[in-house]
Image (spheres, grey):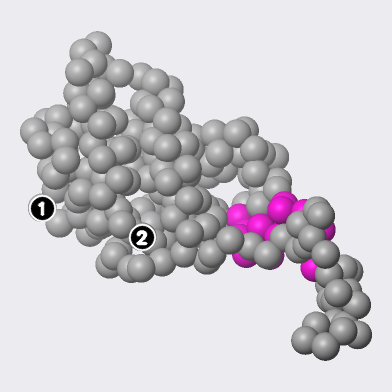
Amino acid sequence: MVISRKSLTIFGLAVSAALFAAGCSSKKASKGSPDVGQAPGDVVGDGNAEGETPAEDASNKPNNKVEALSSSFGLLNFRQVSANLQNLTGVALNAPAAAGGIAPAAEYVRALSSLPTDHAPAAITAGKVASLTKLSSTYCDVMANNATLLAAKFPGLTLAAVPADSAAFAKTLVDGFYGAETSLQGPRASDIAIVAATVDALKGIAGATGPGIFMATCAGIVSSGEFFIF
């Protein structure tokens, strides 16, 4: 019995959540801690004593951490999500569904009410991440079952059987989607390890297939903070 697409999407969500945590931490570290204004109990001079600088108007500073983070990070909105998934996978929104699957356009219509309408990071919820992962899984499902699209993104990758080397498979996917490693992204070894652990878990389940493992891990990667947060 082959693992159901619903179960594979759940694995993809687990990958996305783990990569979200790692990706957010990396981006936060790369941009530095936001200035959240004067800490309680700090004494600010009035600017009249020698050596003092005038206190800044409190209205010019973020009044809490959410506001400060909002000035440094943002989410892709529902239009950008669709365009980004097409760019990452090569699968068009109007592509037909993989055999037995759901077409990206059909899932997009379902997900519209749950995807972000603006860029505010405070709007992110577990439900939005879940909807994005489900939508991503339809793109990855089409890609996994289309040899031309798969070869265009991952030359030489075959899904005829489950991956023999989980770490190598994970590195191929992460490097293929992330592109050239940059200092902004931070080290990707931990991300590769997260994906490899999921591949190992899936390989241990009866009914696992190469396309199924690709679909789950691909969905987790492309719906992660690496691509959903800017």
Q: Is residue 113 above or below residue 91?
A: above
- Dot 2 falls on a residue whose secondary structure is loop
Amino acid type indicated by mark 2:
Gly
Q: Nearer the viewer, residue 137 or 94?
A: 137
What's the residue at 77%, 86% (across, down)?
A: 51
Amino acid type indicated by mark 1:
Gly
Task: Give neighbour class at mark 2: few <14, some 14-19, many 20+ (Cα, 10 Å).
Answer: some
Q: Is residue 198 found left or right of 82 in the rendered image? A: left
Q: Is residue 30 found left or right of 67 in the rendered image? A: left
What's the residue at 47%, 43% (across, down)?
A: 21
Instruction: Locate the N terminus and report the quarter of the image it occupies.
Output: top left
- Dot 1 falls on a residue whose secondary structure is loop
What's the residue at 45%, 32% (across, down)?
A: 13
Q: Is residue 71 magenta?
A: yes
Question: In the image, which residues are magenta?
Answer: 61-75
Q: Could you give the CA–CA distance between mark 1 and mark 2, rounded to whole angstroms?
A: 27 Å
Task: Give neighbour class at mark 1: few <14, some 14-19, many 20+ (Cα, 10 Å).
Answer: few
Instruction: Locate the C terminus and report the quarter of the image it occupies.
Output: bottom right
Q: Is residue 28 magenta?
A: no
User: Which image quadrant is residue 201 in?
Assistant: top left
Q: Mark 1 highlights which residue?
A: 156
The outermost residue toward the front is: 50
Q: Mark 2 highlights which residue?
A: 186
**Residue 136 spot, x, y in % from top left:** 45, 42
